[in-house]
Amino acid sequence: MGRLARYTVLKWAVFGLVLAMPLQSMAEVSSDLVVRYLLATVHAFRTVYVENIMERVSQVGIQPKEEWMKDDHAIMLPFQFVKVAGQEMKSLVKNVDVGLVSLTPLYSANFPKTEAEVAALKQLMADPKLKVLTFTDGKVTKGLAADFAIEQSCVDCHNHHPNSIKKDLKNGDLMGAIVIRLRK
Ligand code: HEC
C-alpha cells in the first residue's frame, strides 16, 4: 500500500471512530432513559393503586389478599398489580420484564436474579435517598426504583406472613425495589 493509500485508510478509520463514538453513547443513554421512564411509570401507577384504590376500598371492608380471586371482598396485592400489569405490557413490547425484588423476600422468586442485581439492591438499601439506580448487566439494561412501605398495611401484612424472614419492618422502611429488565 502506498503512502497516500495508507493515509486515506487511516483518515476514514478516524472518521468512522469519531462518528461511531457518539452513536454508541447515544444508544447507551437511550436504553438507560427508557428504563428510567418505565420505572417512573410503574412506580406512579403502583402508588396510585395503593394510595387511592386500596386505601379507598378498605373503608368498606375490602382488603388486598394473596388469594384475592377466591374472595369477593378482596382485591389484588400491590405486588400482583405490578406483576399482572407487567405481563400486560409484554403484549406490546416483548423485551421488557417488570417485577419486585427484595433481599429478604417472602418468596425466593423475588430475590434479585444476578450478582449485579444483588449489588445494586444492596447499594439502594444502604442509601435509600438514591431512589433510582440503573446499570448494565451483560446485554440487559436494568433499573431499580426504591419501594417504600408507604402504608401501615404493607408492614402489617409482610411482618405476619408465614414466610416472613424479616418481621420488624416499620412504616416508611425501604422494603425492596421495582425492577425493570430491558433486553437489547
Ligand atoms: C395483604 C398482604 C400484603 C400487603 C398489604 C402488601 N404486600 Fe407486599 N407482598 C405480599 C406477598 C404475599 C408478596 C409475594 C407475592 C408473590 O411473590 O406472588 C409480596 C411481595 C412484595 C415484594 C417483593 C419481595 C417479597 O417480599 O417477596 C415487595 C418489595 C413488597 N411486597 C412490598 C410491599 C409494599 C411496599 C406494600 C405496601 C404498599 C406491600 N408490599 C403490601 C403481601 C403483601
Image: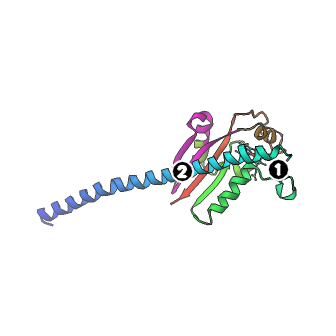
Secondary structure of the residue carrying tag 2 is helix
The stretch of residues the image draws in magenta is 121-148
> Label 1 CB, ligand 1: below 8 Å?
yes
What residue is at 59 percent from the left and 52 percent from the top?
A: 180
Quadrant of residue 169 within the rendered picture: top right
Res. 25 mark = none
Quadrant of residue 3 within the rendered picture: bottom left
What residue is at 86 percent from the left and 52 percent from the top?
A: 73
Residue 37 falls left or right of residue 173: left
Residue 109 falls left or right of residue 120: right
What residue is at 33 percent from the left and 57 percent from the top?
A: 20
Residue 133 among magenta residues: yes
Is label 1 in contact with label 2 (beta carbons under 8 Å)? no
Q: Position of residue 30 (x, y in %)?
A: 45, 53
Q: How many marks?
A: 2
3D distance between C-alphas at marks 1 and 2: 29 Å
Q: Amino acid at mark 2?
A: Tyr
Residue 2 among magenta residues: no
* Residue pointed to by mark 1: 65
What residue is at 73 percent from the left and 53 percent from the top?
A: 80
Q: Amino acid at mark 1?
A: Lys
* Residue pointed to by mark 2: 37
5 versus 115 height, above or below: below
Along the polypeptide, which appears first: circle 1 or circle 2? 2
Q: Position of residue 121 (x, y in %)?
A: 61, 42
Residue at the extreme left: 3
Secondary structure of the residue carrying tag 1 is loop
Which colour scheme appears in the figure?
rainbow
123 versus 65 height, above or below: above
Q: Quadrant of the N terminus?
A: bottom left
88 or 107, nearer to the observer: 88
